[in-house]
Image (cartoon, rainbow, N blue to C red):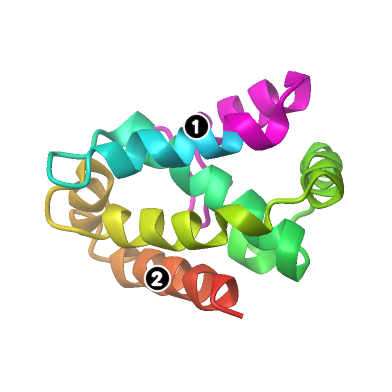
Amino acid sequence: MGCWSYQLLCDDVSLDVLEELAESEELVADLEGYLDEAIMAENEYLEYDICQYALTAAAIIDAALNGIDWALLTQDGKEQPEFEEIIANAAQEGVGDLQEKAGKVIDLAMKEDSELRELWEENEEFYQSWLDNLEEIKNRLKK
């Protein structure tokens, strides 16, 4: 796992997702595709990459609907300008219909059969912070 903090955009896979989405010609469809792939694994073992793609999509949807909270996304609340452009595009194109799926993905990331959760569970120092961070994003999505 190439990550440096428990926030969602502190992970190499999340940065790959942002790079892909920055080039996307169908942003909302791609976001929904990432969510759907994780949801399809609801009754199976959720692989790390699939989960991280979906969580990154959920974070984008949350930020597009509720504004960017950098403390939830980056270490020390550091801004990432390329993320702002993706958020603006997602907000403009409309992602409200994906709100429920984004919340479901967060639940799936925290389930027992999630590789990402298993990896975070091994980190005694930050596991609870990771869970709390996901819960905060999920709560924002419920607004």
Farthest residue, direction front: 97
State yes or no: discs 2 and 1 in contact (Cβ < 8 Å): no
Residue visible at 23% across and 38% down in the picture: 41
Magenta span of residues: 1-30
Residue 127 picture location, percent across and down: 30, 64
Question: Does residue 98 show up?
Answer: yes
Residue 97 picture location, percent across and down: 61, 55
Residue visible at 60% across and 65% down in the picture: 72
* Residue 71 marker: none
Crowding at label 1, few (<14), some or many (≥20) Cα neighbours within 10 Å? some
Residue visible at 38% across and 59% down in the picture: 104
Residue 79 picture location, percent across and down: 79, 53
> Quarter holding the C terminus?
bottom right
Three-letter code for the amino acid on which mark 2 is drawn: Ser
Vertical relation: 87 (above or below) 128: above
Query: Relative to residue 101, is residue 37 drawn left or right?
Result: left
Disc 2 target residue: 129
Q: Is residue 2 magenta?
A: yes
Q: Quadrant of residue 22?
A: top right
Q: How many marks?
A: 2
Q: Depth check: 11 or 57 in front?
A: 57
Crowding at label 2, few (<14), some or many (≥20) Cα neighbours within 10 Å? some
- Work out whether mark 2 precedes mark 1 in sequence or the reverse, and give the earlier one: 1
Disc 1 target residue: 33
Q: Quadrant of residue 78?
A: bottom right
* Secondary element at image label 1: helix
* Secondary element at image label 2: helix
Query: Relative to residue 52, is residue 65 drawn left or right?
Result: right
Three-letter code for the amino acid on which mark 1 is drawn: Gly
CA gap between label 2 and label 1 equals 27 Å
Q: Depth check: 11 or 46 in front?
A: 46
